[in-house]
Image (cartoon, rainbow, N blue to C red):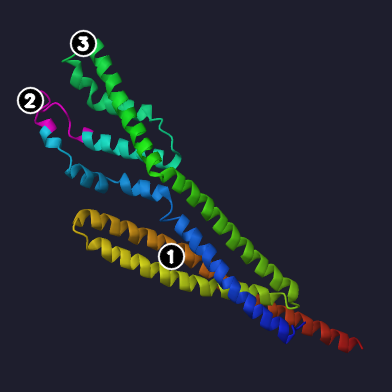
């Protein structure tokens, strides 16, 4: 079995240290992108029944439904479903900047709650006019929200963030690959780079896990202490869940690191045994 010189071993140690940093930065980026930086997770939170219920607590629904004309006619669920629709449309704007509304969903909303309500009190022309006005109001609201986001610089920030994150991931992944390749090039023992890569993964994921768990725990406690108890609890649960997902991702990478360490050790042992057996056969033949 070929052995590496002391210089190569020392060089591999330093490379492993650098690899721990780059792999750690890359994996924490992956974990955050899949959780806290994922707009789908925020959509799930903001369109949840719990959040909509909190949102509706501040809406003056009772005042509207107690109107003599609408009393016992307008289903209170309309406001909840309408809020769900609006939040979904707002999330579409945030994700893509697209202000085209989901007309099919809006049709369903109108047909379920408003069609029959105005059927008895308005002529067909008046109903058609009201429906058009209702659609116009919704479209205007979505476009107004998009304009406000544009003016606030949100879309520019989002674009710059995505570009910066892509560069960040590209640099950390490429550097990690380069360090691994360099270890293979300088090492006669080809199992050593595999082992060191595993060690780097295990170390960086343990450190990442401690950091994520600590920050997630602090945020969870902070949200639980806010004045708006229900809202704070909702965001605390969100942070707790996303922290758990991030830790799961880091845990999978850690297990992979352990696998690389064990695999390299077993493979090296098997290779040494085969080499010894071959040497024994040669000696006997001689």
User: What percent of the width, then of the height, locates residue 135?
Assistant: 31, 24
Cα gap from disc 2 to disc 3, whole angstroms: 20 Å
Which numbered marker is on residue 123? 3
State the residue position of label 2: 68
> Left of 154 or right of it: where is 265?
right
Residue 251 x %, y %: 47, 67
Q: In which quarter of the image is residue 241?
A: bottom left
Answer yes or no: is residue 1 visible. Answer: no
Q: Which of marks 1 and 2 is nearer the N terminus?
A: 2
Per the rendered image, the range of residues in magenta is 64-78
Helix or strand or loop: what does disc 2 sit on?
A: loop
Pick whichever, 20 or 142, lies toward us.
142
Q: Which residue is found at the position 33% from the left and 56% from the top?
A: 238
Query: Are the residues tagged 1 and 2 within 8 Å (C-beta)?
Result: no
Q: Secondary structure beneath disc 1?
A: helix
The relative height of residue 76 versus residue 95 in the rendered view (above or below) is above
Is the residue marked by circle 3 packed among few (<14), some (14-19), or many (20+) residues within 10 Å? few
Answer yes or no: is residue 76 visible: yes
Indicate the secondary structure of the residue bearing disc 3: loop
Q: Which residue lies furthest to the left in this view?
A: 68
192 to 113, vertically: above or below: below
Distance between mark 1 and mark 3 Cα atoms:
60 Å
The residue that label 1 is drawn on is: 247
* Dot 1 or dot 3, earlier in sequence: 3
Does residue 152 lie above or below 188 as drawn? above
């Amino acid at each position: 079995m070929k052995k590496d010189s002391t210089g190569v071993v020392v060089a591999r140690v330093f490379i492993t240290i650098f690899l721990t940093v780059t792999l750690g930065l890359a994996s924490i980026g992956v974990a955050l992108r899949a959780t806290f930086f994922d707009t789908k997770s925020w959509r799930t939170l903001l369109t949840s029944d719990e959040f909509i219920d909190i949102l509706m607590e501040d809406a003056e629904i009772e005042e509207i439904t107690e109107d003599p004309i609408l009393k016992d006619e307008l289903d209170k669920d309309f406001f909840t479903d309408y809020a769900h629709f609006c939040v979904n449309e707002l999330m579409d704007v945030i994700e893509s900047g697209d202000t085209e509304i989901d007309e099919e969903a809006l049709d369903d909303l109108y047909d379920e709650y408003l069609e029959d309500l105005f059927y008895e009190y308005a002529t067909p022309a008046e109903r058609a006019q009201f429906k058009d006005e209702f659609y116009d109001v919704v479209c205007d609201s979505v476009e107004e929200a998009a304009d406000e986001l544009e003016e606030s610089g949100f879309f520019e920030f989002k674009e710059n963030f995505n570009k910066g994150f892509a560069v960040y991931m590209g640099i950390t992944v490429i550097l990690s690959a380069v360090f691994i390749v360099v270890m293979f090039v300088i090492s006669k023992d080809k199992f050593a780079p595999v082992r060191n890569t595993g060690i780097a993964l295990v170390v960086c994921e343990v450190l990442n896990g401690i950091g994520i768990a600590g920050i997630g725990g602090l945020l969870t406690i902070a949200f639980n202490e806010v004045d708006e108890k229900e809202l704070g609890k909702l965001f605390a649960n969100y942070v707790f869940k996303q922290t758990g997902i991030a830790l799961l991702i880091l845990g999978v990478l850690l297990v992979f690191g352990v696998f690389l360490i064990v695999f390299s050790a077993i493979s090296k042992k098997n290779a040494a045994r085969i080499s010894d057996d071959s040497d024994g056969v040669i000696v006997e033949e001689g």
